[in-house]
């Protein structure tokens, strides 16, 4: 393999990569603002088209259009799906207050880590392969989605469908401490319980009241008992609201519960446990309505994915940017591709810290390092066929 040609091309492209990253970081792309965020989608699409990709817009009314860009190749397999979101958690106007800056080996800016750095790494890895080998040696589909920060409600189906049509999913979310890539992520749920009792004067006719707060208290304890530390399961009753005045028996309480699990078995156990707690009326006469559930299934490390991880680690060693592996409680679109049955490597983006804060930064050197690993990995996969 022409490793040297690839790493040389990646190196030569760094100034261009950094100025591309600056351009997209300095454009606001809050999930909820379609018009602003579509501008970033347009730039990504143009860049993908300049690399010979054919793009189509997956039209959305509430969010920016997702872009699906495909690259044909003489190589036939494995078919690669790259996934990255271009929405950020920052409101319109934030990039003007905190523009892209490079200082002391770090770059700061809105979404520089989560995950515009990763988008730049993915695109420039493909460009480096074109320049070093004359073409990207594998068929690649790149999904740029616009709603990951709120749980990918409108891009989920697209991602799952495309995942099933590909052999390997590469997710360009931020790298983990180490530096490491993410090989397992917890599944995440939010459950909402709406408990109804009956209001009554607490002094004059308490016997006519059905206390929704007391019912909620029983349910909180039952649900909290679903925690299972050794399995890595967390169940957190996080928000509770109920009651009006101290002298009124409360007629309504709402409860929100965050759950995180490492495997499908725990997902089923926790779901069943919550459903059971909902069915029981500890305080006779109360009724409970359940909504929500697991919006991200757990991303587990399958044997097929583990084999790809090993290959990537070997290549990373060879190109001088060794990578460890990590598990994380945070979810990403990698949860969706993995649950669709597609081996998934995640955390292939830049390294840094403080995502979702005004101190978000990346280590600039990680751009070149991860770009080198990704490009060499794709070349190595093609060679093995
Ligand atoms: Zn992200």
Image (cartoon, rainbow, N blue to C red):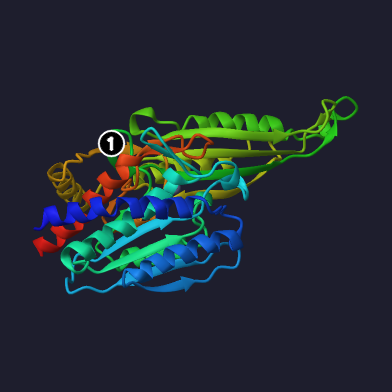
On the rendered structure, is 187 left or right of 306?
right
Question: Height in image: 30 above or below 259?
Answer: below
Question: Height in image: 384 above or below 282?
Answer: below
x and y percentages locating residue 189 in the rendered image: 49, 45
Q: Is residue 218 visible?
A: yes
x and y percentages locating residue 207 in the rendered image: 82, 30
The quarter of the picture where the C terminus appears is bottom left
Element at label 1: loop
State the residue at coordinates (70%, 32%).
213
State the residue at coordinates (35%, 44%).
350
Q: Which residue is mark 1?
A: 179
On the rendered structure, is 314 left or right of 323?
left
Instruction: Say which quarter of the image contains residue 381.
Output: bottom left
On the rendered structure, is 108 left or right of 129?
right
x and y percentages locating residue 57 in the rendered image: 47, 72
Total marks drawn? 1
Question: Height in image: 265 above or below 215?
Answer: below
Query: Nearest the camera: 97 or 158?
Result: 97
Q: Is residue 376 visible?
A: no
Q: Is mark 1 within 8 Å of ligand 1?
A: no
Query: Nearest the camera: 308 or 134?
Result: 134
State the residue at coordinates (35%, 55%).
16
Give the class, few, some or many, for how many residues have Cα within 10 Å of label 1's Cα (few <14, many ≥20): some
x and y percentages locating residue 320 in the rendered image: 16, 41
Query: Nearest the camera: 291 or 60?
Result: 60
The quarter of the picture where the N terminus appears is bottom left
Q: Residue furthest right?
A: 204
């Amino acid at each position: 393999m022409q490793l040297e040609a690839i790493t040389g091309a990646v190196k030569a492209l760094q100034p261009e990569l950094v100025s591309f990253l600056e351009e997209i970081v300095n454009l606001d792309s809050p999930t909820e603002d379609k018009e602003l965020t579509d501008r970033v989608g347009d730039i990504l699409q143009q860049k993908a088209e300049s690399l010979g990709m054919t793009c189509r817009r997956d039209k959305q009314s509430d969010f920016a259009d997702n872009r699906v860009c495909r690259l044909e190749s003489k190589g036939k397999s494995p078919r690669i799906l790259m996934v990255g979101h271009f929405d950020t958690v920052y409101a319109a106007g934030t990039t003007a207050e905190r523009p892209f800056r490079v200082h002391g080996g770090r770059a700061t800016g809105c979404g520089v880590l989560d995950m515009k750095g990763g988008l730049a790494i993915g695109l420039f890895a493909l460009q480096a392969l074109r320049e070093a080998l004359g073409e990207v040696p594998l068929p690649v589909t790149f999904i740029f989605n616009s709603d990951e920060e709120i749980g990918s409600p409108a891009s989920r189906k697209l991602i799952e469908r495309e995942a099933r049509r590909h052999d390997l999913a590469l997710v360009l979310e931020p790298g983990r401490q180490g530096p490491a890539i993410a090989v397992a992520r917890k599944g995440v749920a939010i459950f909402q319980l709406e408990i109804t009792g009956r209001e009554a004067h607490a002094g004059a006719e308490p016997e006519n009241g059905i206390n929704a707060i007391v019912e909620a208290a029983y349910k909180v304890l039952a649900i909290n008992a679903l925690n299972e530390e050794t399995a890595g399961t967390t169940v957190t009753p996080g928000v509770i609201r109920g009651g009006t005045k101290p002298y009124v028996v409360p007629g309504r309480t709402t409860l929100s519960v965050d759950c995180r699990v490492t495997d499908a078995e725990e997902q089923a156990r926790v779901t069943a446990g919550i459903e059971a707690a909902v069915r029981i009326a500890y305080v006779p006469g109360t009724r409970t309505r359940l909504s929500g559930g697991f919006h991200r299934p757990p991303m587990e490390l399958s044997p097929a994915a583990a084999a790809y991880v090993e290959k990537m680690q070997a290549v990373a060693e060879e190109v001088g940017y060794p990578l460890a592996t990590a598990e994380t409680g945070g979810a990403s679109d990698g949860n969706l591709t993995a649950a669709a049955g597609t081996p998934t490597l995640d955390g292939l983006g830049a390294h840094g810290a403080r995502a979702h804060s005004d101190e978000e930064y990346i280590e600039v050197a990680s751009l070149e390092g991860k770009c080198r690993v990704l490009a060499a990995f794709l070349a190595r996969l093609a060679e093995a066929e």
